[in-house]
Image (tube, rainbow, N blue to C red):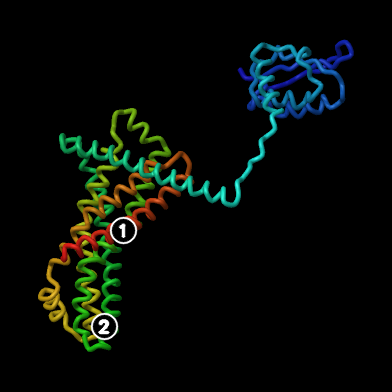
Amino acid sequence: MALPADFTLTEQDGRLAVVLSGDWTARGLFDAGLRLSDALSAPRELELDLTGVNRCDTAGAYAILRSAGDRLKPENVKARREVVRLLELVAAAIQVEPEPTVRPGGFHALLERIGRGVFGLLSDGYNTMVFLGHLLVALGRCIADPRRIRWAPVVALCERAGLDAMPIVATTTFFIGAVVALLGANMLTDFGAQVYSVELIGISVMREFNILITAILLAGRSASSFAAEIGSMKMNQEIDAMQVMGVDPYEALVLPRFAALLLTIPLLTFVATVAGLAGGMLVVWVVLDLSPTFFLQRIVDYVGATHFWIGLSKAPVMAAVVAAIGCRQGMEVGNDVESLGRRVTAAVVHAIFAIILIDAAFALVYMELDI
């Protein structure tokens, strides 16, 4: 049974004897430390008897030493061996002066920041390779034994990451197509070549804007949600519990998200293409008085489906990058909310940067292939 900390004072041979009892712990102290400090405020030689103390921790030891001050001598202390050792450790810790923090300045600080940045970049690359290795192992297991694939979360994530994103993807690409058509109509009319606005809309929407806008929206929508979901599970130690139960988190959490984006991004790209062409067709019809029939016929004759397939060929790569970045940042979340916020932000920023970089790489490759 826990007893609150208490003490009694008596006179012995001209010295003030202090007999402590109860639990001198953080929970049992209450105001005993303050009362003891007030009782020992007079400058007299002390003798401490701690044999009646049940339990003592660093908080109780600090309260005793703070109350006694410099008047306490080791030979005037009666206590069990472990209590004496605790008092010695706390007394030594009190006497240690904190070392001043020296912050480098100028050129030294610049070099330190550059070094930390390079080390962080190398560490990030190493962690990415580790994540990719885990993912490939989990993928190989599922290919060898398809019964390991969790179809229920795949279908649920397809609805959440794909079907639920259709309205925002369609709306955004519709206005992108309309803006491209408006700019093309205004600029090409000065040269009497306003009819070529149709080719401008068709090539830009079918080749670039459909997959680019879709991937960027998925980066802001799906990559952040993946990082937040997996990161919150990491904070609550649910992923550790899964590993203890023998469940691979890469099979249970990462692979379904990969599969969901790979399955849904071609559909979203098609929806974005239709919406972008619809927005451009509407502007061309209103501004240039070119009928929808003329618009569609010119798209078929002079643009063709090649540009659509070129845009669609980027979809699996974009889906893999968005899912990988979101899941990896979620796996890197620590045990605090600040880490979760930083990782969710990093997931969106890294995904958008990777999308633009990959799109530029595809453009250079297709330019060299002359398609």
Q: Quadrant of the N terminus?
A: top right
Q: Quadrant of residue 43?
A: top right
Q: Residues within 10 Å of mark 2 (few under 14, many from 20)?
A: many
| Circle 2: residue type | Ala
Q: Secondary structure at mark 2?
A: helix
Return the disc, 1 or 2, that comes first in the chain's sequence: 2
**Closer mark to the observer between disc 1 and disc 2:** 1
Instruction: Say above or below: 137 vs 166.
Output: above
The CA span between labels 1 and 2 is: 30 Å
Q: Position of residue 326 (x, y in %)?
A: 34, 48
Q: Is residue 110 left or right of residue 334?
A: right
| Circle 1: residue type | Leu
Q: Position of residue 78 (x, y in %)?
A: 74, 11
- Seen from the viewer's position, the closer of residues 219 and 207 is 207
Q: Secondary structure at mark 1?
A: helix
Q: Position of residue 281 (x, y in %)?
A: 21, 77
- Seen from the viewer's position, the closer of residues 226 and 320 is 320
Name which residue lies at 10% across and 76% down.
Answer: 301
Identify residue for label 1.
357
Name which residue lies at 12% across and 70% down.
Answer: 304
Q: Quadrant of residue 170?
A: bottom left
Instruction: Say above or below: 77 vs 328.
Output: above
